[in-house]
Image (cartoon, helix red, strand yellow):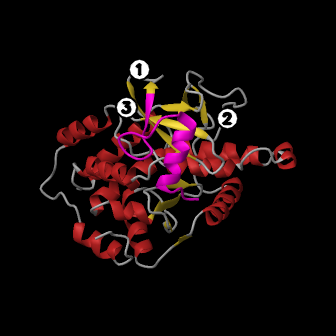
Amino acid sequence: MGTTDSGTEAVNKQETGREPSLRDGVVGGARCVHCGAIGTAWPIRFQDGGGLSVCAGCGGWIARDGSAESPCGVCAFPAASGVVEHARCQEEEGAIPPAGRTSEQELLSEAVEELLETMFESGRPDGLTEYVTGLTSSLVEGSVPDAKFVDLGEPVVAVLPGRQLVMSLGLLAALEDEAQLAFVIAREWELESSGWGYRRFRAASGTRRSWWQRLTRRSVDPLERALELSMFVGYGPAAERAADRGALAKVVHHDYDASAPLKALRRLESAAIAGRGARFLLAGERAEWLQSGARSLGCSDSTRLNREVYRRVVDGFRVFAG
């Protein structure tokens, strides 16, 4: 599924007529339709070649034709900006996952896990799985299944149906300590508890069952697109920053270093492979808010990083560069 840097540059030049600027994959753009700034757009590459860019200035979504997009409030897939929900979407009960696991959730979880196996090399290595699952259990309410890891060098993370936490080895390599990892995990559960992932995958599952789509095979698997959007793009700047706020409060409540969230996002932004993911861009006022939020929440005398513990566990799987 990977795209080489040279391949990404070739695609960028072909589609935009401009050479990438600043760093690979960041393409000089026109005035942003969201914030009005003349800046750069970060193109996202999907397996089916679908076009979606993220403004590096404000984090807004931009369609291939340059128009503004934002997440549909019902299905969480991209929709034209200003459209609260797609015409095909209707509000229905269950936007936030019900307690327990229904038969529908079980089937959806199985389908997504099967798809994950076909798209990525994944597994649950002993030691690392126990460590991340234990950390997750300390941060969220209720039981959680064992964490799963995909063999990708770039940082990606998502909570999939069935409360399944999936993250890349590249994400672990990019972070420095447990405090930063705790923030990343906590923010994914903020999104999960808000029902974003559930809405997206449920909508994709319903579309996937369409007899017309199965018959014509004209489009990419909706579950595949949902998986890519969740891991590489997220749920738009408003939802992502709300998750930042909730996760910052949670890590401070658990006596982790309040400066860890901003440090985590800076490291993940630097580690992101150009043209693939844009979840961790510190666009707009995101960095400023995290910094001021950390100052306002302060630190207790028992703030912790658990850096050595983190390195001992993660370094055992040779995911650190040095």
Residue 312 % position (x, y): 29, 76
Q: Which residue is mark 3?
A: 57
Circle 1 sits in a helix, a strand or a loop, which is it?
Answer: loop
Magenta region: 1-29
> Tag on residue 36?
1
Q: Amino acid at mark 2?
A: Glu
Based on the picture, tell me whether residue 62 belongs to the magenta stretch.
no
State the image quarter where residue 14 is shown.
top right
Image side of residue 23 versus residue 65, left or right: left
Spot occupied by residue 254 in the image (x, y as percentages of width and height): 27, 55
Q: Which mark is residue 205?
A: none
Residue beneath the point at 58% across and 64% down: 120
Q: Residues within 10 Å of mark 2 (few under 14, many from 20)?
A: few
Q: Residue 239 falls in which quadrant of the image? A: top left
In primary-sequence order, the first of circles 2 and 3 is 3
| Amino acid type of the residue tagged 3 in the rendering | Gly
* Disc 2 + disc 1, Cβ < 8 Å: no
Q: Is residue 195 visible?
A: no
So how many labels did they put on this image?
Answer: 3
